[in-house]
Amino acid sequence: MGNRWFEIRNEQDLDTPSLLIFKERVQHNIENMLRITTADRLMPHVKTYKMIEIVQMQLAMGITKFKAATIAEAEMVAMAGGKFVLIAHQLVRGKAERLALLQAKYPTVHFASLVDCVEMAAHLNLIFAKHKLIAHVFIDVNNAMNRSGHEVNDSLIDFYTLLANRDRFPSLVCNGLHAYDGNFRQTDFLERKKAIDEAFLPVQKVIEKIAQLGFPKPMIICGGTPAFTTHALRNEVYCSPGTCLVSDWGYGESLPEQNFEWAGILLTSVISKPKKGYITLDLGHKAVAAENPIEKRVKFLNLENYRFVSQSEEHLVLEVADWEDIKIGQLLYGVPYHICPTINLYQEVYIVENQEVIGTWQVIARNRRIY
């Protein structure tokens, strides 16, 4: 089966189901991001891994800006030593208050969040004024996904102009625009690039209009991992890939030009051979992301000729060709199809160097609240 880089020499000491993070491969992926663009243009998303140590690995390579999905992830970045973090959501209800408290706790960190409407800008301005702080925001631009953001139309310029009015919002500063286009997943790079460029063109016109109105040059944050190799070709935007730090089977297949390595591997045990030709693993819904069809949840690296039969909370049943040769307690190594929600299922992960587990890291920001 070729290079068995994934096999662990001290595997007998490990519990299952578990997740292995291969530190050298994470390092390769960081270096590969830096081959695609420069550290000062990177704003990697931390939602995939949620671990302080991976943030610190990036800081050591000169990457200082990060994007997060939750306030807990933003606090994790601050705990790791990061100095700039954008929470890529509108902070509804009590979340604005939580961000103000976090900003007071880490006054040297530049925190920002997204807004796409006047109501949310007013809400942030009110909360941060109460704390005698300044809320930094980016306008979330809906240029592709129809998931969140302000539509790209004439009122977007009006909204930007309104946010720049410090008399109207004295406790709020607009830093720029955020445009996420994660819906473009074409395997062919040129086809994907064409779709991304077409979707970005209206945003580019908005940027030009902002300049014509005499405003300072806004920061522009674009895309995720699928669009990374396209937006990296734009000289004046920040790129925010995230999944690529650990990578997975899904993106490995659909983004062949990016050259990121699988760094997160599932370890699972054969716990039963319920009938001839069938084996059962302890890799249920609670151990691997289950939002995709069953045949697109995990790819096994040390097993051939298998078919997925069923999965439940604690069990995964396979039909296998080599049933006689498989033993109860045997370990299988698998690549998740979607690593982001898979990591979120684990409180801690095993860390691998030189094919040996050397310790564990806590997935600290899987919790919705740290402080």
Image (tube, rainbow, N blue to C red):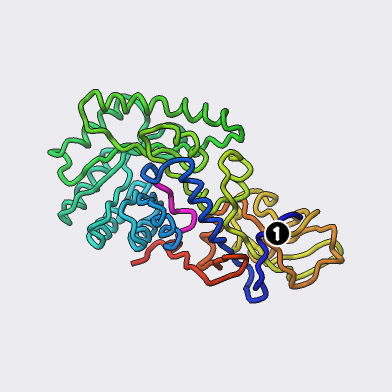
Question: Which residue is nearer to you in this view: 323 or 38?
Answer: 38
Q: Is residue 35 covered in magenta?
A: no
Q: Residues within 10 Å of mark 1 (few under 14, many from 20)?
A: few
Rendered location of residue 37, percent (x, y): 44, 40
Whether 26 is drawn above or below 40: the answer is below
In the rendered image, which residue does mark 1 sit on? 4
Residue, x 28% and y 28% (percent of image)?
A: 157
- Tell me how many marks there are: 1
In terms of secondary structure, what is the magenta stretch mainly?
loop
> Which secondary structure, mark 1?
loop
Q: Examine the image and state in which quarter residue 117 appears.
A: top left
Residue, x 31% and y 47% (percent of image)?
A: 113
For this view, does 169 lie left or right of residue 88?
Answer: left
Quarter of the image that includes the N terminus = bottom right
Rendered location of residue 285, percent (x, y): 62, 60
Rendered location of residue 135, percent (x, y): 23, 48
Residue, x 33% and y 67% (percent of image)?
A: 371
For this view, does 136 lie left or right of residue 188?
Answer: left
Task: Give the magenta-colored segment's residue range.
Answer: 43-50
In the image, farthest residue toward the bottom? 13
Q: Is residue 49 covered in magenta?
A: yes
Question: Which residue is nearer to you in this view: 192 or 181?
Answer: 192
Question: Which residue is nearer to you in this view: 52 or 306?
Answer: 52
Whether 194 is drawn above or below 87: the answer is above
Rendered location of residue 131, percent (x, y): 17, 56
For this view, does 166 lie left or right of residue 316?
Answer: left
For this view, does 98 lie left or right of residue 284?
Answer: left
Q: Examine the image and state in which quarter residue 269 appears.
A: bottom right
Going by the numbered disc 1, the residue's amino acid type is Arg
Residue, x 41% and y 38% (percent of image)?
A: 222
Question: Which residue is nearer to you in this view: 188 or 126?
Answer: 188
